[in-house]
């Protein structure tokens, strides 16, 4: 199982980090050691002083595929969830400044808490789903999948040109604007529509 993350897929988020808008999907990988499941806590690592949350709709792949055409992409998933792409922003910035890859800031242990999954039949349109994140009871990030630069099907078509998708693979589809830092003692609470999906305590 692999975790494929899409970067800069919401225009307002790209702007808040002063990044140009991509012409094709930008993706990177996280290993399965990033996963936190069943509302387990996140322990703040000692190698960073600036861990940020990025709340994202997550798609779980349900069959093997490569070179998938967009018109068939919807048949490769039947469930979505919500996840947090934790980012060591200080490490990421140093890597960017030196022209280096920045997996160190994204792929560290426990950097991908993930919720349970919901059948997409629960939704009229997967490209019109509201989601949000609360920290300590205050809403800090709001998104809707209609604002993606590249749709879920666009992402599947593009990524599968380069990487074979396998059953159980996860695609983090990008984060809207409103990212920010977490601190020890925070509780993160993520929702799809009004359904409570994920809680993460920062310890």
Image (cartoon, rainbow, N blue to C red):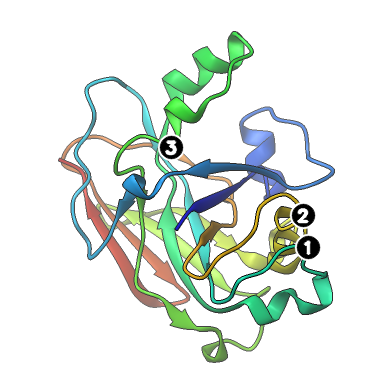
Disc 2 designates what residue? 161
Labels 2 and 1 touching (C-beta < 8 A): yes
Q: Nearer the viewer, residue 46 or 160?
A: 160
Compared to residue 18, the image places residue 166 above or below, namely below
| Residue that appears at 68% across and 66% down | 152
Nearest to N terminus: mark 3 or mark 1? 1
- Which residue appears farthest toward the top when viewing the image? 98
Quadrant of residue 165 in the image? bottom right
Seen at 83% across and 77% down, the residue is 71
Q: Position of residue 31 (x, y in %)?
A: 42, 44
What crowding class fits label 1: few (fewer than 14 Cα within 10 Å), some (14-19), or many (20 or more)?
some
For marks 2 and 3, give the CA distance.
33 Å
Separation of marks 3 and 1 at Cα, in angstroms: 36 Å
Left or right, 21 with respect to 81, comes to: right
- Lateral position of residue 177 relative to residue 104, left or right: right
Q: Nearer the viewer, residue 28 or 150?
A: 28
Q: Position of residue 173 (x, y in %)?
A: 59, 57
The circle drawn on residue 180 is: 3
Disc 2 and disc 3 in contact, CB within 8 angstroms: no
Q: CA distance from mark 2 to mark 1?
A: 5 Å
Q: Residues within 10 Å of mark 3 (few under 14, many from 20)?
A: some
Q: Helix, strand, or loop for circle 3?
A: strand
Which of labels 3 and 1 is toward the front? 1
Q: Secondary structure at mark 2?
A: loop
Residue at the spot 69% in from the left edge and 35% down from the top edge: 15
Q: Quadrant of the C terminus?
A: top left
Q: Residues within 10 Å of mark 2 (few under 14, many from 20)?
A: some
Q: Is residue 132 left or right of residue 144?
A: left
């Amino acid at each position: 199982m692999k975790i494929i993350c899409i970067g800069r897929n919401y225009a307002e988020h790209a702007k808040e980090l002063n990044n140009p808008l991509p012409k094709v999907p930008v993706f990177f990988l996280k290993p399965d050691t990033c996963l936190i499941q069943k509302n387990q806590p996140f322990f703040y690592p000692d190698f960073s002083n600036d861990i940020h949350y990025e709340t994202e709709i997550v798609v779980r792949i349900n069959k093997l595929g490569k070179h998938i055409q967009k018109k068939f992409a919807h048949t490769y998933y039947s469930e979505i969830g919500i996840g947090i792409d934790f980012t060591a922003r200080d490490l990421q910035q140093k890597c960017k400044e030196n022209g280096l890859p920045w997996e160190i800031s994204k792929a560290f242990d426990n950097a991908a808490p993930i919720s349970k999954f919901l059948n997409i039949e629960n939704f009229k349109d997967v490209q019109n789903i509201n989601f949000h994140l609360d920290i300590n009871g205050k809403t800090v990030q709001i998104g809707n999948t209609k604002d993606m630069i590249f749709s879920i099907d666009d992402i599947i078509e593009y990524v599968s040109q380069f990487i074979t998708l396998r059953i159980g693979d996860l695609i983090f589809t990008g984060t809207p604007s409103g990212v920010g830092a977490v601190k020890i003692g925070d509780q993160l609470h993520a929702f799809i529509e009004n359904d409570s999906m994920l809680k993460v305590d920062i310890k």
